[in-house]
Image (cartoon, rainbow, N blue to C red):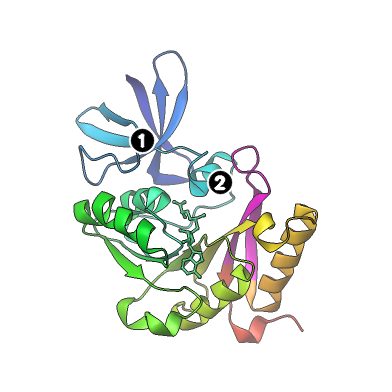
Amino acid sequence: MAERVRTHKLSPSIFTISMKGGKERLATLNLSPGISVYGEELISSRGKEYRVWDPFRSKLAAVVLKGIKSFPISAGSNILYLGSASGTTASHVSDIVGESGFVYCVDFAARSMRDFLSNVYQHRENVSPILADARNPENYSHLVGSIDGIYCDVAQPEQAKLLLDNATFFLSLGGWTLLAIKARSIDVARDPSAIFEEELHILRKNGFEIGDSIRLDPFDKAHAMVLSYYEGESSRLQ
Ligand SMILES: C[S@@+](CC[C@H](N)C(=O)[O-])C[C@H]1O[C@@H](n2cnc3c(N)ncnc32)[C@H](O)[C@@H]1O
């Protein structure tokens, strides 16, 4: 039972719900009331329905709780989501951008895409499924409209390059990117901190200005999220 719903300081589209007993839960306003996407709890308060957003299931929720400096996704944003899987986080992004925004969801795993279709796409008009390899943006460029930012969570060794290839294709200068880095996808043996530094260097070298970089422990071990802004070739480090 919800006791009080407050807007989160990072965004008017994210909520903190105080539960009876004192627990606080992060949540988004449910764009498809009555539908739970991945078993998350639905909470009603004052005629509105919220979906609890679990930081152990969603890295984006984890960065909100860990205090990212600024949250670039807002109502009306158009977003390219790389690595949408079955739609756990993408569904919350769909709630946040709302009816006036749109989320283009790319994943190359057919099985996850099937779950995405039945759990997310079937109930929401602001998402589109794109079954494709995110390493080849030219293969899906005709399916993606104008975007404000790219959320990238593909757990690939060459994820910074993959992000750059998509940014060059789709993003205007100054557009934002959020990149989830899984150190173990890059090298299982090395110190995660050294790997994160290298990825930041690759981003800077390729024209991204770093806005924030956050470790996701304790929600996700050896993961980090990097917020950056694409400034293009002219700002590349030599
Ligand atoms: C960690 S999961 C994503 C979880 C999801 N972002 C969430 O929070 O709900 C990584 C996803 O990236 C996808 N993926 C990995 N490499 C890819 C590629 N080259 N192109 C498209 N999808 C890819 C995988 O199929 C998997 O579904």
Most extreme residue toward the front is 111
The image shows residue 20 at horizontal and vertical percentages of 39, 15
Amino acid carrying label 1: it is: Glu
Amino acid carrying label 2: it is: Val
Q: Is any part of residue 95 visible from this angle?
A: yes
Q: What mark, if any, has residue 102 been given in the picture?
A: none
Asked if the magenta segment contains residue 213, the reply would be yes
Asked whether 16 or 179 is in front, the reply is 179
Q: Quadrant of the C terminus?
A: bottom right
Asked whether 200 or 229 is in front, the reply is 200
What residue is shown with label 1? 40
Q: Main secondary structure of the magenta part?
A: strand
Disc 2 element: helix
Q: Quadrant of the N terminus?
A: top left
Most extreme residue toward the top is 21
The image shows residue 106 at horizontal and vertical percentages of 40, 67
The count of marks equals 2
Disc 1 element: loop
Segment tinted magenta in the rendering: 209-228
Asked whether 69 or 143 is in front, the reply is 143
Label 1, label 2: how far apart the Cα atoms are = 19 Å
What residue is shown with label 2? 63
The image shows residue 98 at horizontal and vertical percentages of 28, 53
